[in-house]
Image (cartoon, rainbow, N blue to C red):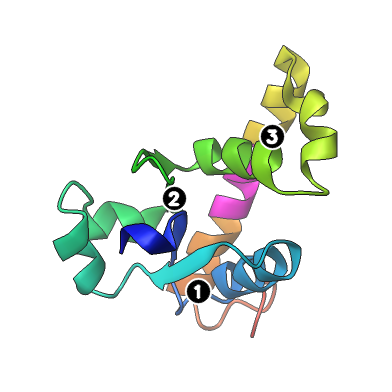
């Protein structure tokens, strides 16, 4: 599994997660995506908790460092070609506040889309 790092864990049952996965795959072919529902990943990385991984995005770096939530956004902004050009926007307090606000709003949408099938405002596949 080490030769496939970095790995992003995502929820394949979440429409919003699938959209982000598709967008990231378009930006960087070197990222590996693994379902947070796949029990095998927890055998390779026992320090991960399945419930927590299903609640928010997790990334395992090539150094086996585990990042979650907004830390994943920081990592991707700094390392993805094309996106890294905008990393300077997050280097000040205002940029970090905007990123955190955006991340938390996306999390709210993700929770709605996975918990409410009758939500007409939630993104669909």
| Residue visible at 55% across and 83% down in the picture | 118
Q: Residues within 10 Å of mark 2 (few under 14, many from 20)?
A: many
Question: Callout 3: few (<14), some (14-19), or many (20+) C-alpha neighbours within 10 Å?
Answer: some
| Residue 47 point in image, percent of width and height | 18, 46
CB within 8 Å, label 3 to label 1? no
Q: Which residue is mark 1?
A: 14
Mark 3 vs mark 1, CA separation in Å: 21 Å
Can you identify the residue that label 2 sits on? 59
Mark 1 element type: loop
What secondary structure is the magenta-colored segment mainly?
helix
Q: Secondary structure at mark 2?
A: strand
| Residue 11: percent from left, percent from top | 43, 70
Q: Earlier in the sequence, mark 3 or mark 2?
A: 2
Q: Residue at the spot x=43%, y=56% of the render?
A: 5
Can residue 104 be found in the magenta stretch? yes
CA gap, disc 1 and disc 2: 17 Å
Left or right: residue 69 compared with residue 47: right
Say which of marks 1 and 2 sits in front: 2
> Left of 7 or right of it: where is 53?
left
Which one is closest to the eye, mark 3 or mark 2? 2
Question: Is residue 102 visible in the rendered structure shown here?
Answer: no
Q: Is residue 39 above or below residue 91?
A: below
The verdict on residue 103 being magenta is yes
The x and y percentages for residue 15 are: 58, 76
Taking the spot 38% from the left edge, 40% from the top edge, the residue there is 63
In magenta, the rendered stretch is 101-107
Q: What residue does disc 3 label?
A: 99
């Amino acid at each position: 599994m080490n030769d496939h790092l970095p790995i992003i864990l995502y929820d394949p049952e979440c429409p919003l997660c699938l959209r982000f996965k598709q967008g990231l795959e378009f930006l960087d072919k070197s990222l590996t995506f693994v379902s947070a529902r796949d029990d095998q990943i927890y055998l390779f990385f026992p320090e991960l908790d399945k419930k927590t991984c299903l609640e928010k995005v997790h990334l395992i770096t090539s150094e086996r460092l585990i990042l979650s939530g907004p830390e994943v956004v920081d990592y991707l902004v700094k390392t993805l070609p094309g996106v890294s050009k905008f990393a300077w926007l997050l280097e000040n307090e205002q940029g970090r506040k905007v990123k955190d606000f955006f991340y938390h709003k996306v999390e709210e949408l993700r929770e709605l889309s996975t918990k409410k099938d009758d939500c007409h405002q939630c993104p669909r596949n």
